[in-house]
Every structure is written in structure tokens, then in C-alpha cells.
Image: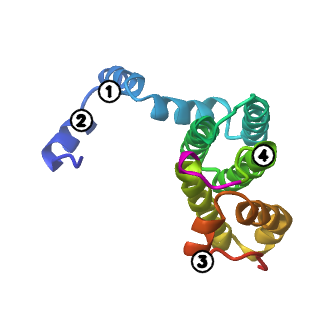
């Protein structure tokens, strides 16, 4: 929402104490902004590795749940994917977002390969999600600098091998995903 010029000038001319009160009231209403300011000002943007490790731990713990349907696997993957997106939004850690999403997909596909082995109507939504997630990861990897991309070749190829061996293979073919990446 753009502010009119008159309002901008009036806000700038307000006493500092009054502006601080208004700013604090506004920040408390936006959790994302509050978390981002905490990350940048309090944590001094130095906790990215710890935050990544914490998310990876959550991914591993969640992948060990004993899910027995593709639907429940999908619910867990979507939930963790939202956590990763929030991490990127707060920290601006785009490389970490790609790395965490790649880790998420590989971990879940390996853990639940028996449930996701064959395509069925119950696995359809999950299969489509997996293929689309793989495509998003590959697009993100292509946007990275070539030096960074080489670090992820092994994991990306493992992901593609799993995507093409499970229920998602039909969608992967339709989306024309490569069977192997070479950056």
C-alpha cells in the first residue's frame, strides 16, 4: 500500500518518541516482520547455519513418523515446505532454501519409497506435488552461480532418480524433467 506524500511528510515530522510507539505497535501485528527484525538486529544475521540445522533435524524427525498413506506423507512434506519458505522469507537465505528443499524431498522419498512406489488414485496428489517440487528445486539450482550448483549435483541426481522410480514418474515425464543433471 503506497502512502500519500502528505502522510509521509507528516510521519517524518512526528516526534521520535511518538514514531517509536507507532512503529512498535505495527511490528507486533506482523509476525514475519517481527521475526525478520529479530534475526537482523538481535541475531546479527549470523544464525543461518543453526537455523538450517534445526530445520534439517525437524525434517529427519518428521520423516521417521510411521505414515501409512501418501496423503499423510504429503501433509508432512507441505508443512515442512512451509517452514522452509518461512525460513527463506525471514533470513533471505535462498541457497539454504534450495538446499533444505532438496534435503526434504530426498529424505521423504527415501523414507517412504515403499508407500510411494506405485501410482494410485490415493497417491495422485502426492505424486504431482513431488514432481512439481522437483521442478522448483531444479529451477532454483539453475539460478545459482555455477560454483554453488556443483555442490548439489549428487543430491539433485539422487532426487531425480527417486522421482523417476516412484509414483511421480508419470508427472515427471509430462513436465519433461531431466533424468540427470549436469550443470
The tag on residue 19 is: 1
Q: Give the distance between the C-alpha atoms of the residues marked 4 and 3, in whole angstroms.
A: 24 Å
Residue lying farthest to the bottom in this orientation = 182
The tag on residue 114 is: 4
Front disc: 3 or 1: 3
The tag on residue 176 is: 3
Q: Give the distance between the C-alpha atoms of the residues marked 3 and 1, in whole angstroms.
A: 54 Å
Identify the colour scheme used.
rainbow
Instruction: Specify whether 51 is left or right of 9.
Output: right
> Would you identify the image quadrant in which residue 150 lies?
bottom right
- The span picked out in magenta is 118-122
Element carrying mark 4: loop
Q: Give the distance between the C-alpha atoms of the residues marked 4 and 2, in whole angstroms.
A: 60 Å
The tag on residue 11 is: 2
**Considering only order in the chain, which callout, 4 or 1, is on the residue closer to the N terminus?**
1
Residue drawn at (40%, 29%) of the image: 30
Element carrying mark 2: helix
> Would you identify the image quadrant in which residue 175 lies?
bottom right
Instruction: Specify whether 10 is left or right of 58.
Output: left
Q: Is residue 54 above or below residue 153?
A: above
- Mark 2 touches mark 1? (CB < 8 Å): yes
Q: Give the distance between the C-alpha atoms of the residues marked 2 and 1, in whole angstroms.
A: 7 Å
Q: Nearer the viewer, residue 98 or 5?
A: 98
> Would you identify the image quadrant in which residue 78 lies?
top right
**Considering only order in the chain, which callout, 1 or 2, is on the residue closer to the N terminus?**
2
Residue drawn at (69%, 54%) of the image: 118
19 in the magenta segment: no
Q: Nearer the viewer, residue 133 or 89?
A: 133
119 in the magenta segment: yes
Image coords of residue 137 (percent x, y): 64, 62
Residue drawn at (61%, 34%) of the image: 72
Report the quarter where the C terminus lies. bottom right
Amino acid at each position: 500500500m503506497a502512502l500519500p506524500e502528505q502522510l509521509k511528510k507528516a510521519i517524518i515530522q512526528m516526534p521520535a518518541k511518538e514514531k517509536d510507539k507507532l512503529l512498535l505497535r505495527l511490528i507486533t501485528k506482523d509476525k514475519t516482520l517481527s521475526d525478520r527484525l529479530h534475526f537482523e538486529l538481535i541475531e546479527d544475521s549470523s544464525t543461518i547455519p543453526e537455523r538450517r540445522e534445526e530445520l534439517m533435524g525437524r525434517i529427519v524427525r518428521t520423516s521417521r513418523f510411521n505414515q501409512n498413506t501418501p496423503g499423510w506423507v504429503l501433509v508432512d512434506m507441505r508443512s515442512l515446505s512451509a517452514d522452509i519458505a518461512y525460513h527463506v522469507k525471514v533470513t533471505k537465505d535462498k541457497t539454504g532454501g534450495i538446499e533444505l528443499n532438496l534435503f526434504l524431498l530426498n529424505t521423504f522419498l527415501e523414507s517412504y519409497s515403499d508407500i510411494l512406489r506405485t501410482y494410485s488414485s490415493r497417491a495422485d496428489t502426492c505424486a504431482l506435488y513431488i514432481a512439481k517440487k522437483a521442478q522448483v528445486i531444479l529451477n532454483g539450482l539453475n539460478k545459482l552461480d555455477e560454483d554453488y550448483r556443483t555442490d548439489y549435483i549428487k543430491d539433485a541426481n539422487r532426487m531425480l532418480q527417486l522421482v523417476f522410480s516412484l509414483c511421480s514418474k508419470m508427472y515427471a515425464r509430462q513436465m519433461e524433467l531431466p533424468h540427470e543433471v549436469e550443470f
